[in-house]
Image: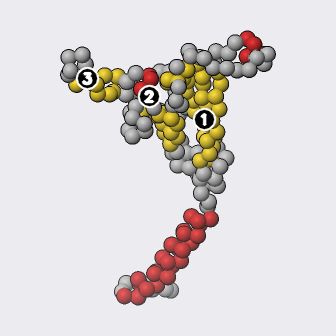
Amino acid sequence: MTTIHKGRNTMNRTRPFLFLGLALAAVQAFSQGQPKLQLDVSERKVNMTADERSGKSPVSYAPGDTIEYVILAKNAGTAVMVRPEVVDPVPEGVRYVIDSARGENCRIVFSVNKGMAYAVWPVMVSATNANGVRIERPARNEEVTHIKWILRDNLPPGGQKPLSFRAVVE
């Protein structure tokens, strides 16, 4: 029969196991790898002409044309990416199409100040009305500078998530 006594030696007996446990946890964490976010961005003209669709003429862009941007967020690393966030600036020369941002199981937020702050749509901005009074008003689509997708799920190694939005050529 073994008897365990409480006293000074109890801590000394458990301390080597504690250090061994911490060392094993550190080695395990290091060997699990790192997540790595890779973004592949493509664009597609939504309102192509028949000749553009058939390949008879090259795709060209003119004011009023709609472009769909698709961002494929991939975890190219070897560890799970915990609730990643993807930010994409709205390209110069186009304006965001309201309610066009998509991403399954994502919270989508918008910036009107070059990515300094984000809010859900409609983003409220401070402005001065015709009487010189400061007011809060909904942002206009041409004021959107950045879109952020906050994924609600983890992204496993090799996992990917398509995100998209549309914009109109100015």
Q: CA distance from mark 1 to mark 2?
A: 17 Å
In the rendered image, which residue does mark 2 sit on? Answer: 144
Sequence-earlier tag: 1 or 2 = 1
Give the mark toward the camera: 2 or 3: 3
Above or below: residue 20 compared with residue 135: below
Secondary structure beneath dot 3 equals: strand
Q: What residue does disc 1 label?
A: 71
Residue appearing at x 52%, y 40% in the figure:
86
Residue 162 seen in this snapshot? no
In the rendered image, the vertical position of residue 95 relative to residue 64, given as above or below? below
Instruction: Kindly identify the amino acid type of the residue bearing the numbered disc 3.
Output: Thr
Q: Position of residue 148 (x, y in %)?
A: 48, 36
* Location of residue 8 in the rendering, given as x and y in whole percent from the top left corner: 37, 88
Q: Which residue is mark 3?
A: 128
Given residues 116 and 170, the one toward you in this image is 170
Q: Residue at x 31, y 22 (%)?
A: 137
Looking at the picture, which amino acid does disc 2 mark? Val
